[in-house]
Image: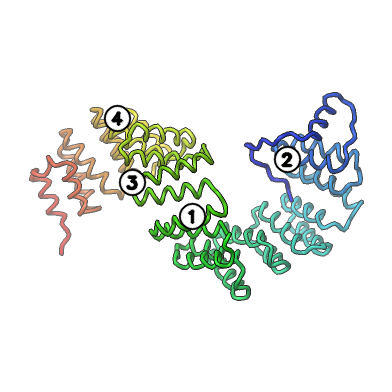
Amino acid sequence: MFWQEASPNQDPKTPKSVQRFERMKLDGRLTFFDALELEDIIQFYMGCNNPRKALEATRYAVQQYPYSTNFLLTKSQLLASTGRMRMALKVLEKVESIDPLTSELFIIKGAILSKLNHHNDARECFNQAILHSEHLDVTYLDIALECENLGNFKEAINFLKKSFDANPRNPQILRELAFCFDVTDQVEESIRFHSYLIDNQPYHETAWYNLGIAYSKLEKFENALDAFEYATLIRDDYADAHFEMGETLSALGRRNDAIKAYEKALDHQPSSRTLYCIGECWEDLEDYGKAARYYKRALRKEPDMSDAWFGLGIVRYHQLQYSEAIQHIRMAIRLDEYNSEYWHFMGEIMQMQGEFTEAEEAFRNVIRLEPFTASVWIDLATSLISQGRNEEAIQTAIEGSREHPDYAKLFYHICGYLMNNGQIKESYHYLEEALSLDYKGHSVFLESFPQLVADPHITHLIELYQPSR
């Protein structure tokens, strides 16, 4: 109903009717357009994410066809979508004077009244839309979509269920229902609804698919796998179900089976995301040659896919091709500079290569983007130690310990840094904190700081904090 903004990346070719409309505006001469041409012009501007021009074209359409309820309804929608609710309602008054029984009029009016917080009046408009509807399933669905746009997902569920009762074979209704159940965190209700539906319509592939999605949300992967398998048995070309089977099998650690499911999805619907997922499976199986091939195939379809560039970087790292790995990860970061995982891996490679300044920058970006990643504070402190900036490293680790007071490894490292810096008494305090948080962690601590193994005071503290058996 209400016009939704299209992707700003759309670049459709300009139709001749639009070119004529643009020339008319430049020349200032009125030109005749038939109704279909004007509809195409309006849709073109909507698709180009240009509501101002869409509204301009709609106004011209209304001038040429003043009694066309379609153009008046579109004008009302555009006015409402740009926040001019009162003007939109005025336009609907004219529609009502021409055709007071069109259900779309009441749906748009109800949505506008809801936006203005006149909820009782809005509900009455929706009731009128249902009363005058020739296609109840469509009307219920349109009302549900308006409820979704307004954030009233629970109300949307009620209308979607009614729409489904009126037309149980419309797959969009079940897709919207699954979405609303997910948004409202009613996963168990989704399972109940779709299970009941399957009991009555066992060959409803969309119901099986939605059931699988719901089980996946609860991490009941075996149940999810059964549901997706039934969906594909009912409809072999159900690409989404094959893909979700792949996702589920991956979650179960069955990489080879996952690859087969993803390949089946590819057979019916070529997708860069599916190619990427297959590459990820081969990477997990440590077949880096095949992983690289699939990541490259994904990038041929979608050159700006940052995950595939990152995956290719990881593969090159494992193949000891560090220079290429760095290039690929830099490309991933260029495409998605807010991904902390990319920065973290870049920091680790740079640190390994002895590029401590670049490693430091990468780790600082991780902390900026996601300070809740506890281990990165140790990584940053280590890069500072490598640059001889010991005091700064100690302060960084201490700051990290304040952010993560339960992360024992940080306290162990602070102890080691302080010991190496000659701050013996302070170091013992942090060791005691670490031992009280995670006693077993002291063995890794002594491996990281082997020079402290012979320190009698440290040995004493370790014995002192040993849990009683």
Which residue is tagged 3? 404
Counting residues from the start of the chain, the first of labels 3 and 4 encountered is 4
Please report the residue visible at 46 percent of the width from the left and 40 percent of the height from the top. 296
Which marked residue is nearer to the observer: mark 2 or mark 3? 2
**SS category of the residue bearing label 4:** helix
Q: Are the two marked residues, 3 and 1, in contact with CB atoms closer than 8 angstroms?
A: no
Q: Residue 33's image quarter?
A: top right
- The image quarter containing residue 258 is bottom left
Residue of label 2? 46
Give the structural element (helix, strand or loop) at label 3: loop
Q: Which residue is tagged 1?
A: 262
Q: At x 45% / y 36%, what residue is drawn?
A: 332
Name the spot of residue 133 as percent of width and height, x first. Answer: 82, 62
Question: Which residue in the structure is indicated by mark 4?
Answer: 356
Q: Nearer the viewer, residue 113 or 30?
A: 30
Q: Is residue 32 left or right of residue 296?
A: right
Residue 352 falls in image quadrant? top left
Three-letter residue code for mark 4: Phe
How was the colour assigned to the protein in this rendering? rainbow
- Callout 3, which amino acid? His
State the separation of the CA atoms marked 3 and 4: 24 Å
Type of residue at label 1? Tyr
Q: In the image shown, does 75 or 210 lie closer to the viewer?
A: 210
With respect to residue 349, does 182 lie above or below? below
